[in-house]
Image (cartoon, rainbow, N blue to C red):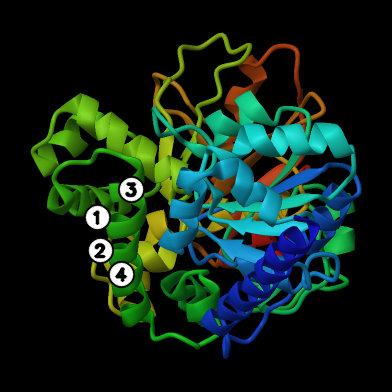
Amino acid sequence: MAKNTDFIDERSERRARALHGRASEETKGIPFIKRHAEKALAELVLSFPVILVTGPRQIGKSTLLQNTPRTGKIPYITFDDTSEIAAVKNDAKTFLSLHSPPVVFDEIQYVPELFPLIKLKVDKNKKKAMYFLTGSQHGLGFETRHLMKNISESLAGRIGILQLMGLSVRETGGDTFNKPFIPTMKYFTARKKDVKNYSAFDIWKMIHTGSFPAVVSGFSRQKAFYDSYIRTYIERDVRALSNVGNELQFMQFITVAANRTGQMVNFCDMARDVQISEPTAKKWLSILVTSGLVYLLPPFSMNVEKRVVKTPKLYFLDTGLAAYLTKWTNPDVLRQGAAAGAFFETFVVAEILKSYYNAGMEPSLYYYRDKDKKEIDLLIMENGTLYPLEIKMTATPKESDAAAFKVLKAVKGLNIGSGGLICTTDSLGIIGKDRYSIPAFWL
């Protein structure tokens, strides 16, 4: 029996190496851009037996693991391979025994059967960095079988989670600066040592291109990539993990969501545009959030005397994909179009999110809007202090652009910190006391 087991183990190792090679082949030719999340990943490796890298498809999760010294050489199994899914469904316990840690399991959401078995393995061995998982869902969303629900039930306290988004401006430009954005002089002093200046044309090219590595690197043509991405997303992920029903209507719903980036969520309008029910619109938006394509920015309502809105704002996180869906064919047309302000705001919010996720942190972000229609685009809350930010597509910032910050005097029990206007100006400036004009490329 021992010989037979050895033979199976050797065969398993050869197969794992072959799969690792195939995964490498899929990304062969795409220039590797160093990810800032590598440092946060290294810290998780030292702390947890299981590490999950989560984020949208083709955002670079597997590439990150394959190019990190601690994980780059270990066996790699992908559950995009239906034969591997079948092997787990047939006998999950035997499957796991054939793939000894350390090992990478890619697209783990397809095989939730492995979670309780991984728990038993890590509880028995009590070692760090045994299993590296990637998954294309995060946050709240699918009512059944979604990734985070299974993890919270099976691997609580045993897993470190790294959320990965598309390439940031910092990463694309080769910046080494990796601190989360906060509008303070301390941050700006540190940031200026490594900041790269970009023209307004450069920024709009980035907005139109988006942040998927294959497109940013020039490996894939933009339209062809997004054509394939949407088709794969609907046919593979949505069909497999959620009972959408009418896939054509769901495609229309994705486009409706892209058209509403930077706006407050209105389920009634979204449902009417696609001719679906409001409950269906809520379910489908939840799918987009779960898949990492959409971010919902919550309204700020803590300790506020005035009546405030309770509806989140929708941001379609990859502006390149949103531009593709809404038929903006080049950066100049987008910059001059009716949606320019919303796309610029979306770009800024996404860059701020990336700065936190890449540092391994979960940000506390909000927006403010009261019944008098006084609005602040973004609030960052940290250590009992609110940092207010306006986002505006202007190269000539003025003090009046931050006038809405006065409403924060009605907030009780929190300090109001420095803030400012994030805009298309080409240099950091001052527009008032503790109020800055902030170029978008300083994020």
**Label whose residue precedes the other's in the sequence (1 or 4):** 1
Q: Are marks 2 and 1 in contact (CB under 8 Å)?
A: yes
**Label whose residue precedes the other's in the sequence (1 or 3):** 3
Disc number for residue 380: none
Residue that label 1 marks: 255
Q: Are marks 2 and 4 in contact (CB under 8 Å)?
A: yes
Amino acid type, mark 4: Tyr
Residue that label 3 marks: 240
Q: Is residue 381 above or below residue 305?
A: below
**Most foreground residue, 169 or 156:** 156
Residue depicted at x 38% and y 78%: 331
Determine the CA span between mark 2 and mark 4.
6 Å
Q: Position of residue 79 (x, y in %)?
A: 50, 58
Amino acid type, mark 1: Thr
Residue that label 2 marks: 326
Q: Position of residue 432 (x, y in %)?
A: 72, 46
Determine the CA span between mark 3 and mark 2.
26 Å
Q: Is residue 108 left or right of residue 71?
A: left
Amino acid type, mark 3: Ala
Residue that label 4 marks: 324
* Of marks 1 and 3, the one in the foreground: 3
Visible residue check, residue 328: yes
Determine the CA span between mark 1 and mark 4.
9 Å
Q: Is residue 244 left or right of residue 160?
A: left
